[in-house]
Image: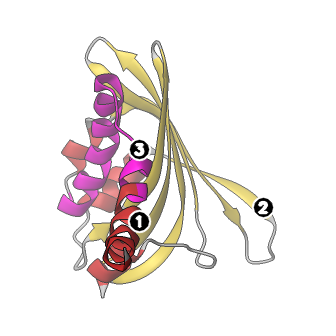
Amino acid sequence: MKKRLIVLAFILPVMVCAAQEKEYSLEEKEVYKVVLNVFDAMRAGDSTMLGKSFMPDVQMFTATYDKEGNPILNQGSLHQFKLAIASPHDKIYDEPIWNTEIKIDGLLAQVWTDYAFYLGDAFSHCGVDAFQLFKTKGGWKIFHLTDTRRRDNCEIPDHIKKQKN
C-alpha cells in the first residue's frame, strides 16, 4: 500500500500537467503557426520572414507606463519592427511564450499569450501579447498587435528560466 501511494504521488502531478495542456484544433494550429513565425523571425533577425505574418497596414501598440507612472499607449509600426529585427545586433532577440489562448470565429482569430523578452540570455521585460488575425485567401495574417511591458511581477515558468541561466 505504501509503495502505491509513493508511485501515485509521482504520477499524479504528471497526470494533472498533461490534463492542463491544450490540444489545438487544425485551425488553431494554423493561427498559432503565424504567431510563432513572428518569434522565429525575431530570433533569426529576418525581417522578410517577419513580414509574412502581418498584413501591410497592421496596427501595433504597446500599453505601458511613463516615468511618472502614468498609463500610456505607444503606437509602433511594422516598418519600425522590421528595422529593429534586421539591424545588426550582437544578441539574439528571444521571446518565449506560455499560457497561450486562441479563439476563432470565422475569419477572426485572437491570440493572447504571456511572454518574456530576452536579449541573448539577459532578461529585459515581460508582459502579454494580444494578436488579432484575419483569415485572408492566403491564410491567417496579423492585423493588430498590442503588448504590455513590465520588469516587475514577471511569473516566468521555471523551464524558461532554466534555458536562460
Q: Judge from the rendering whether residue 114 lies leftward or rightward of residue 68; answer left or right.
A: left
- What residue is pinned by disc 3? 78
Sequence-earlier tag: 3 or 2: 2
Q: Residue at x 56, y 74 (%)?
A: 154
Looking at the image, tell me whether mark 1 or mark 3 is earlier in sequence order.
Answer: 1
Pointer 1: what residue? 13
Main SS type for the magenta part? helix
Q: Amino acid at mark 1?
A: Pro
Residue at the (78%, 61%) spot, across then down: 71
- Above/below status of 89 relative to 73: below
Residue 71: assigned label: 2
**Residue 164, percent from left and from top:** 30, 82
Q: Nearer the viewer, mark 1 or mark 3?
A: 1
Q: Nearer the viewer, residue 145 or 161?
A: 161
Q: Nearer the viewer, mark 3 or mark 2?
A: 2
Indicate the secondary structure of the residue bearing disc 3: helix
Q: Amino acid at mark 3?
A: Leu
Which residue occupies the foreground of this view, 132 or 30? 30
Mark before the other along the chain sequence, 2 or 1: 1
Q: Secondary structure at mark 2?
A: strand
Disc 1 to disc 3, C-alpha distance: 42 Å
- Residue that appears at 37% across and 56% down: 15
Label 2: few (<14), some or many (≥20) within 10 Å? few
Residue 2 showing in the rendered view: yes
User: Which image quarter holds the C terminus?
Assistant: bottom left
Q: Residue furthest bottom?
A: 165
Where does the N terminus fall, quadrant-wise?
A: bottom left
Magenta segment boundaries in residue numbering = 16-45
Judge the density around disc 3: few (<14), some (14-19), many (≥20) Cα neighbours within 10 Å: some
* Image position, residue 66 (x, y; %): 73, 70
| SS for callout 1 | helix
CA neighbours of label 1 inside 10 A, class few (<14), some (14 to 19), many (20+)? few
